[in-house]
Image: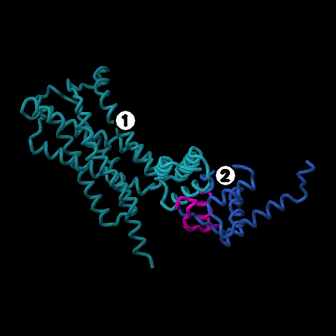
Amino acid sequence: MMRTHFDRWLLDKLSVTLEPELREAVLGDLEELNISTVHAICELLGLLLRRQAKPWTSWRPWLALFGIVCPITWLLTNLSSAVASGLNIQALAYWKYGVSYGTGLTGPQEILTLVCQSLAIIFWSWTAGYVLGSLSSRTAWMNRAVLCLVCFFHGKVINFIWPYLQAVLSFKHFGSIKFPFYYYGAIYPIVLLLLFLLPAFTGIRLAQRYCQLEIKPAILLTAAIATLTTLVTLTEGWQFTAVERWSMGALHYPTPGWEERLLPLLLLSWPAAYLLTASTKSYRSKVTAP
Amino acid sequence: MLGEFEYLLLAASARLGDDAYGAAIRLEIENATGRRCSIGALYTTLDRLEEKGLIKTWVGNATQQRGGRSKRMVKVTAKGIKAAKGFYETVMRSSTGVSWEAI
């Protein structure tokens, strides 16, 4: 069966997730078996499906999916959206009125809040990506796809609709802030890419290459994340009290306590604890090995 | 104990000897069973048998017929021979006194 250049290109692209040696063998077999291209594609897809299904018999990919991809992606998308909203409001205020948007915080407080949140999101994303890559390297591409879906679906649709839905149902007051179209077209995607997606995918890639983090980098990473988590909890509290102070008590929100603010951030930090535990175990087994 | 398809794969590899590789094993199995054998089932089972230590595989030579792509050669190990022999003897023992013609 003579295959066209396009047929070979298509089979090549479909088999890209296979290991190189297996890919060579399978494509060679399909060439030798003299079957139609459609039949060859069905055979290849069958193999890909079986290979993707096999790792799911273990607990690791499930922990990766339900412990990291779903909850942590959702939280980090929320936080990235908050950072992007803050930047967007400031950019709008400068662009339209030539002044900064008053949040009640001082200039240094604003900068510290932005830097802490941004760094924290980057560290959380990288760590989550690393643990994702080390838990299930065989299902990494599927986890990456689900991560992107959760990220864009949640970030784009829900964050666009939810404020208006809540305002209509009067659960919470969001004022008259409207997000112009360039927020979702430019600012938000850039913030999401730089703070969340790039670090997460870098973490996944490094985990697939090195698998185990050494003890010293693991300790430094955990310390950095603990510090940033504390700073983000602290700076979030500033924003709530600043609004109330600025409005001289007119705008009083039920301020969440530090425990309530810390809880979701602890969920974001569990991958760091997992990495530290795994690195410590590996270090101990190397030290005690004869 | 081996599964049915695992035994078929081991038997085909043993019969082919030095020429046992993916496409050849697939054709042998199809000729013996009269049923189609998918590449997915074949390579998944090869991986499983190799994990169990029943076969070993390595990269073979490329040929023009295969578009210049190399083969995955297969050889049954001593452990694999023992497992296949055990499966065969079990089937023979459980078939003693059974005549499928008479039923």
Q: Mark 1 belongs to which amino acid? A: Phe
Q: Residue at x 38, y 69 (%)?
A: A283
Q: Mark 2 belongs to which amino acid? A: Cys
- Looking at the rendered structure, which numbered label has been put on residue A15? none
Give the colour chain B carries in the figure. Answer: blue
Q: Nearer the viewer, mark 1 or mark 2?
A: 2
Place residue B1 in its image quadrant: bottom right
Q: Secondary structure at mark 1?
A: helix
Q: Nearer the viewer, residue A192 or A159?
A: A192
Q: Is residue B61 magenta?
A: yes
Q: Is residue A214 left or right of residue B81?
A: left
Question: What range is drawn magenta here?
Answer: B43-68
Write down the residue under mark 2: B37
**Position of residue B79 measured from the top left corner of the image (x, y, whole percent):** 67, 70
**Position of residue A89 measured from the top left corner of the image (x, y, whole percent):** 17, 33
Q: Residue at x 25, y 39 (%)?
A: A257
Q: Are marks 1 and 2 on the same chain?
A: no
Q: Secondary structure at mark 2?
A: loop
Write down the residue under mark 1: A153
User: What is the spatial separation of the Cα atoms under label 1 and label 2, in whole angstroms?
Assistant: 40 Å
